[in-house]
Amino acid sequence: MKALPKLILLTLPLALLAGCGQKSQPAAEAQSGKIDAGRVVAQAKCAACHGIDGASMGPDVPHLAGQNPVYMLSSLGEYKSGARPHAALQQLINQMSDEEAQNVVAYYASLKPINTAKANEGVAGDRLAAGKEAAAQCAACHGADGNSKVNGTPSLAGQHPAYIAGALAAYGNGARKDASMDKIAKGVVDTTAQNLGLFFTSQSPVSRNNGKGDAAKGEPLSGKCGGCHGQQGHSADGTTPALAGQDGAYLVKTMKDYRDGRRKHDEMHTQLAGVKDANLEHIAAFYSKQTPTPNASTKPTSGQQWADRCDKCHGPQTATAPLIDSQPVVYLARALKDYRDGKRAQSSMHIMSSPLTDADIDAVSAYYASIAPRAR
């Protein structure tokens, strides 16, 4: 038979995937199949994607060897009922009898789990180290540690990581324009941008104190800015840049661009409308003189730290959730993103994955892919 795309349980186990709160068939029913008969079913209908030994035949297909039988049988039932959308799998499962489903589940559950730990050693990496490496291309303008010495160029040290990643995305998609930044940002993927943000956030910022205006006059004029950028430019909002200690020339140019419509932002345009150039200089001088503070978000959550949360459902103590240890990293990351973005429906998984950035998902997926299957 020709390979059907993404055979049995393509959605199977993803760390955090379908696990928490999912209803399942009784364990006795899940384990009641005949292993030898199940091997025949697996050879005919499942092996093209999942292997006769239960080892994934592609990077975005899960291993089935040693998978939780309760979870597998429950998943098959959901494909059959249409609760899980996947045309090829739904067609395949609807061609199976209940007995065949129980048999193939029993067969794959009886196999020794696939151990990819050695092959995936080091795949998780170090996000701060990755960010530092990526930051090398930024050093000429923004400084090796994010403290720029170039007039008119902003410092990035201590800045919010979400703001840095968002700014790179804006340059990449054309929402923000700058000849040198446009070229660099278009080649930066989301994960790299997030790692860059983490690296620059972890650096200690220093005050530029180079504004040309009168800081004393700028203080009362900055009142309307504090609502978003914080008192004295210490922003508490991760998407709003901190202004304390920033380059004066950069602040003046940016405010003029917002005021005059060259840079699009309705609220900034409204706030700066009618403000004279001299007053912009005073505001910039005030913020440039302020002492910046280190950002509290200096250490990224590691894959193991995320996994400590995931293991509440997917750890070795659970009887119903899917096995995700040593699963293909590409599959794990794709499934998590689908849960986070609402492409796969499972309320508890959506809630768990909603706060994860792409870099977080890469970290937790890499962690689970690189550990040996744990005994249940």
Image (spheres, grey):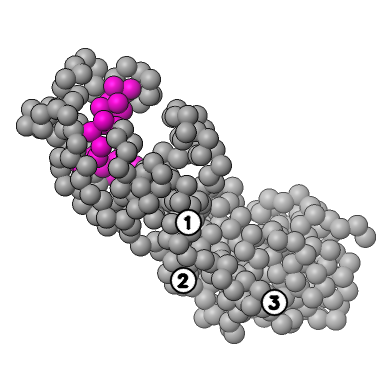
Image location of residue 127, percent across then percent down: 46, 61
Residue occupied by mark 1: 133
Check disc 1: other Cα within 10 Å, few if <14, some if 14-19, many if 20+.
some
Residue 245 among magenta residues:
yes
State the image quarter where residue 73 is shown. bottom right
Q: Is residue 300 above or below residue 274?
A: below
Q: Please, what secondary structure does the residue beneath circle 1 have? A: helix
Give the left or right position of residue 85, taking residue 148 as reference: right
Residue occupied by mark 2: 304
The three-letter code of the residue at mark 2 reads Gln
Q: Earlier in the sequence, mark 3 or mark 1?
A: 3
Q: CA distance from mark 3 to mark 2?
A: 20 Å
Q: Please state which of the two labelled residues, at mark 2 or mark 1, is closer to the viewer.
A: 1
Q: Please, what secondary structure does the residue beneath circle 3 have? A: loop
Q: Please state which of the two labelled residues, at mark 3 or mark 1, is closer to the viewer.
A: 1
Residue 279 vs residue 136, the one in the foreground: 136
Image location of residue 294, percent across then percent down: 24, 54
The three-letter code of the residue at mark 3 reads Ile
The residue drawn where x is 18% and y is 25% is 281
Do the CB atoms of the residues marked 3 and 1 lie less than 8 Å apart? no
Q: Earlier in the sequence, mark 3 or mark 2?
A: 3
In the rendered image, is residue 218 in sight?
Answer: yes
The residue drawn where x is 78% and y is 65% is 57
Residue occupied by mark 3: 114
In the rendered image, is residue 321 in sight?
Answer: no
State the image quarter where residue 13 is shown. bottom right
Q: CA distance from mark 2 to mark 1?
A: 22 Å
The residue drawn where x is 69% and y is 65% is 62
Image location of residue 21, percent across then percent down: 51, 65
Which residues make up the magenta segment?
Answer: 237-258
Of all residues, the one furthest to the left in this rendering is 216
